[in-house]
Image: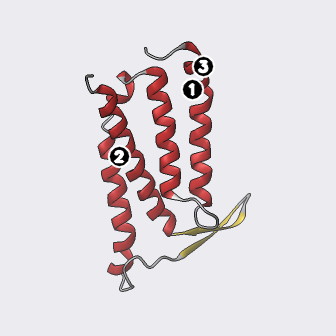
Amino acid sequence: MSGDPVLRTVARAAAPLTLWVSFVIFLQGHNMPGGGFVAGVMAGAAGAMYLLAFGTVRVARFPWWKVSVVGLLIAVLTGTVPLLLGRPYMQHSIWHFDLPVIHRYELPTATFFDLGVYLIVLGTLMTIFVELAQEER
């Protein structure tokens, strides 16, 4: 285990909080500034904080590059599905749902594109951070 006790203590609270802020930024991306890229950078910052506080042993076991690949597939499919349905590439629409507590909920299909961008950014940053952390000095 690396890092000092103060850093580990702060990271235990700050990393989940940073992930929560990342989630909120992701959700507001279609109505206000934010979205997949900024939220992915915030999640990557939480990952970097975890790496600094607790080391690379647990995080390095996960193949982060696969997260980027899944994100790329989601982003490409988000644009391709409308094309296959005879509409322009990347044309988005809004799905409407009637939910019990929230009542009327609108889900833009662009949210799926943002999810792809989020995963690409998170996977790429975490791959870079893990590789840099494991590099011998």
Q: Give yes or no for contact between labels 1 and 2 (Cβ–Cβ under 8 Å).
A: no
Q: Is residue 130 above or below residue 22?
A: above
Q: Residues within 10 Å of mark 3 (few under 14, many from 20)?
A: few
> Residue 116 is drawn in which quadrant?
bottom left
x, y (%) of residue 93? Answer: 52, 77
In front of the other: 36 or 94? 36
Question: Mark 3 sits on what residue?
Answer: 9
SS state under label 1: helix
Residue at left 56%, top 74%?
94
Residue at left 29%, top 33%?
131
Which one is earlier in the sequence, the residue at label 1 or at label 2?
Answer: 1
Question: Mark 1 sits on what residue?
Answer: 11
SS state under label 3: helix
In the picture, measured across the screen, residue 53 lies left or right of residue 21, that is left
Residue type at numbered disc 1: Ala
Q: Give yes or no for contact between labels 1 and 3 (Cβ–Cβ under 8 Å).
A: yes
Residue type at numbered disc 2: Thr
> Residue 56 is drawn in which quadrant?
top left
Question: Mark 2 sits on what residue?
Answer: 124
Q: Give yes or no for contact between labels 3 and 2 (Cβ–Cβ under 8 Å).
A: no
x, y (%) of residue 90? Answer: 40, 76
Which one is earlier in the sequence, the residue at label 3 or at label 2?
Answer: 3
In front of the other: 97 or 33? 33
Q: How far apart are labels 3 and 2 at the CA level?
A: 27 Å
